Image: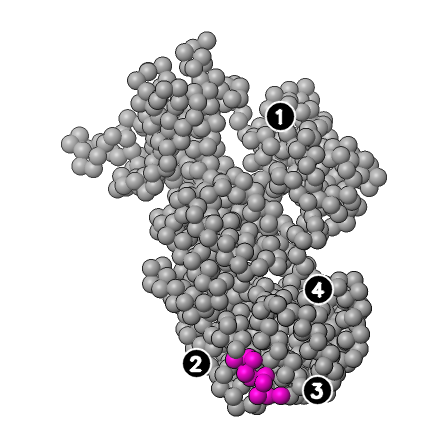
Amino acid sequence: MSILDKAFPPILPMDRFKSNDPNFLRRAANLVFKHIDDDQFAGSQLAEQLFLSREQTHRKIKQITSVSTGRFIRYIRILQALVHLQSGHYSVSEIGFKVGFGDPAWFSKCFREEMGASPMEIKKNGLGPEWRQLPIFSFYTLPEVNELLASHGIFINTKTIHKTEETLPRRKKWHYLIPVMMVVCVILVLITSNKKAETKSVIRPGTRIAVLPYNNQTGDSSMNVIGDIAGSWITSRLSEIDSFQVVPWFTVRQYQQYVGVTPGDPQQKPLFNEIVSAQYLVNGDYFLKGSEIYFNTRFIDANTSAVIYDFPIIRGSKDSVMTLIEDIRVRIAGLIMNLDAVKLGKLIPPNIIAYRYYLKGMEELNTGLYFTNARKYFEMAVDCEPNFVEPRIFLTWTYGGVAQDSMISMMQDILKTPGITRYERKICETWSAVFQRQHKKALEMALQSLQSYPKDYYFNMLAGYLAKAMFKPRLSISVLNQLTEPGQSDFGMIWHYFKVFNYTESLLMLDRTGDAVAYLKNISDNHYNLEIPRLLINATVSSGGSKEDVDQIIDSIARTKVHLLQFEYGLDEDKLYSTWYLSAAWEFSLRGADTSARYFAKKGLLKLEKGNGDAYGFDKVDALFLMGNYEVAARYIRQKLQERPTNEDLWVYLAQAEAASGNYQVAFRILKRFENKSLIKFRRNEHPYQKDYIKARLYAILEQEGKAVAFLKSAIEKGQLMHYCDYRRDIFLRSLRNCPDFVALTAPD
């Protein structure tokens, strides 16, 4: 045994790293995924396609994963099934067929054997703590296996996962989640590629990176091999990430002698980076201090030799060399994936595993805004990298119904994160101002940040939204116009949704309905989103369109866009139609065109009753209210209150329905339930309403203009600006539309 073997026993068998076929496990897993829905695909078929005997295949898989070939295949199928179960997109039977179990009963039996519970139990209750004790958990958490599965979209929280009433938020209409959209889009400053989340990189395709052998500073020449192990291991693992190229290790070793050559060499020797065509270099040192080994790593511009990023020193015991080298590798990968943002000082590079979990969470937000899955991935990202700021910010938004003071406290905790960048600090401070209802201050901070970070997606959108909310539509339009249309990427589409929403509503605040209609109609299919039909209906009605005009628009959207929305959001036609019809009813009601409003409300109610009675916040109560059936709406709400007697949404809506029915004394008695509260949760809005705002609505319904405007003014002074629409479009304030004091209060600045 060599001195190195004695001093640095590897955490994995060294022949693993000397293998002539380092991609064997990847090829095997890829074949399983390729045939995952084929119930006839087994160990013999796998061996045949690997061009090996069954014994060789078994021996190789067993050596790496400690499980048999059959168990290897079954574990992958079960883990893929678990991902499908947690997504909620398929029935148990469908999942069984999708992962290669031809018989649903056999699927349930095998699943229970491996997971300790049936698929239905886990779909209903989530994973319990016993999951961590199962052999399949040990398989999943093997480093060789975990990242391999991640490349196929299998991300499972290794913590206990429980679904509870408190942690499962309801599906929400997009325009109730504007604040979430603004936070979500911080990722846009980090990502410009259109590749899938697992392989995104800000580095131009074709960019080459060379990893040099680490320099031995221990004073012990027998430890030189550690430098080679570090360089070769990092090179081989980085090469698995798409979007950039890693100079092969044998090429680096062949031309290593040229590393020290400087420009203008007297012997005219070429530079190392010119020979290997590398734009960036990774270089480092290792040294001993007592019983610990230290690694220092630098990311260098190969053309100027300038250090772009100097990683914090990583240290550990002498018997943890490979663990330390792998830690370095994932941090280098995280830097590469976020290089532009790191150069600008926007973030400290996270490790690549944490970053991939983070991207997966962002993808979940974009594909439906169902927070359960997004929260799971953000928690895993924070698990991997506790000081990774972005997922910590997004986690604060995945806990529905959190009080404003709690949100402020969470942001204050994030501000204490070691190594938080100036950019991340500005994000948290701006949001803290929003949570404290200091909207003018928050707008000023966002505009100032745009001076430091020109054309920054995040601060551009936050400034655009706040400007609109503060009745400054011209400023909003000006800010939002600073950025060009995004490419068709997950995160670019989130930003585009946000721009479309606020840009259109700003135009409508200025009565530029023709411009709004033209803008919406010119949006390409590549950028089409769920809110565009509603905004188009709004603009059409606002410009004086008739019932027939709106029917034609909805029919046109149904013919040309339904397939896009169904593909993107997985919605059925009844849900889409109910949303559009009730949006039209809302707009006609605001205009006082009650006949048209009732016409569309009735059509929307019929679609609702064909579905599950809910369509993105426009539920049956909305339909009844828009039809003018206030007493029926009140009775329906009281029925719902028997199921959820403490639900603030229902109590507030009941007060408004009773006021509309003429029972104003009952309405104000209901409001006394909130005597000791200044903020009231209503209509699933992320930001609670001022109690004065609710009073303004009740008085507006009773057509007492003076009191209504006074309470609305008070609510605005107290910070009630985070509302999903301009106050002139609040259905409960419609009696104030022609009131001079109301018009002056809500006039564009």
Which residue is found at the position 70% from the left and 50% from the top? 164
Above-or-below relation of 10 to 507: above
Q: Quadrant of residue 694?
A: bottom right
- Closer mark to the observer between disc 1 and disc 3: 3
Q: Position of residue 745 (x, y in %)?
A: 49, 83
Q: How many marks?
A: 4
Quadrant in the rendering for residue 107: top right
Question: What whole-number distance in Å separates the C-alpha atoms at marks 3 and 2?
Answer: 31 Å
What is the distance, in whole Å, between disc 4 and disc 2 at their CAs? Answer: 37 Å
Q: Nearer the viewer, residue 580 or 510?
A: 510
Gap between marks 1 and 4, in whole Å? 50 Å
Taking the spot 67% from the left edge, 24% from the top edge, the residue there is 67
In-front residue for pair 60/610: 610
Which residue type does callout 3 highlight?
Asp
Task: Specify which label sits upstream in the sequence, 1 or 3.
Answer: 1
The picture quadrant where one finds residue 643 is bottom right
Mark 1 or 2: the one toward you: 2
Q: Earlier in the sequence, mark 4 or mark 2?
A: 4
What segment is highlighted magenta in the picture? Answer: 704-713
The residue where tag 3 is placed is 594
Residue 74's tag is none
In the image, is 94 to the left or to the right of 158?
A: right
Return the residue at label 2.
Answer: 749
Q: Which mark is residue 647?
A: 4
Taking the spot 74% from the left edge, 32% from the top edge, the residue there is 114
Q: Are marks 1 and 2 in contact (CB under 8 Å)?
A: no
Q: Nearer the viewer, mark 4 or mark 3?
A: 4
- First in sequence, mark 4 or 3: give its number: 3
Is the C-beta separation of discs 4 and 3 under 8 Å?
A: no
Residue type for callout 1: Thr
